[in-house]
Image: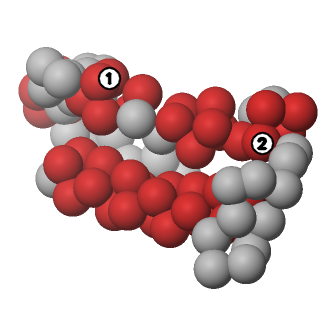
Amino acid sequence: MWNHSRPDSQYAEWQMPGPAEPPVRAKGKLQWKLLLLLPYLGLLFPVVYARNAPALFGIPFFYWYQLLWVILASAIMGLVYRHLRD
């Protein structure tokens, strides 16, 4: 059985919470996120870096260029993370 002993006026105070406020976008967040495109763009066209010269310590350009981007991508991701974390 339903308990109807309370008047409905007591429940009038209850309201559903409204939609949450959208987070405030800090100016400049997009610029930091765009930095994440650099590793992608640097390795997008292998035809540009698919060559042997210049060699670095005997390692062909094709290999050390990609390895350089692994290191740069890690540094870029760390930098972007530091600036975008709350």
**Quadrant housing residue 29:** top left
The residue sitting at 50% across, 67% down in the picture is 71
The residue sitting at 38% across, 62% down in the picture is 75
The residue sitting at 20% across, 39% down in the picture is 6
Tell me if 73 is positioned left or right of 7 in this view.
right
The label shown at residue 49 is 2
Q: CA distance from mark 1 to mark 2?
A: 29 Å
In the rendered view, how is the structure colored? Answer: secondary structure
- Rate crowding at label 2 as few (under 14), some (14 to 19) or many (20 or more) other CA atoms within 10 Å: some
Can the viewer see residue 63?
no
Percent across and percent down for residue 45 are 81, 31
Up/down of 55 relative to 57, above or below: above
**Quadrant housing residue 63:** bottom right
Nearer-the-camera pick, 6 or 81 = 81
Percent across and percent down for residue 10 are 12, 32
Residue type highlighted by circle 2: Tyr
Percent across and percent down for residue 19 are 30, 22
Nearer-the-camera pick, 86 or 19 = 86
Of helix, strand and loop, which one carries label 1? helix
**Quadrant housing residue 48:** top right
Tell me if 27 is positioned left or right of 50 in this view.
left
Residue type highlighted by circle 1: Leu
Mark 1 or mark 2: which comes first in sequence? 1
The label shown at residue 30 is 1
The residue sitting at 13% across, 19% down in the picture is 27
- Rate crowding at label 1 as few (under 14), some (14 to 19) or many (20 or more) other CA atoms within 10 Å: few
Tell me if 13 is positioned left or right of 32 in this view.
left
Percent across and percent down for residue 40 are 65, 38
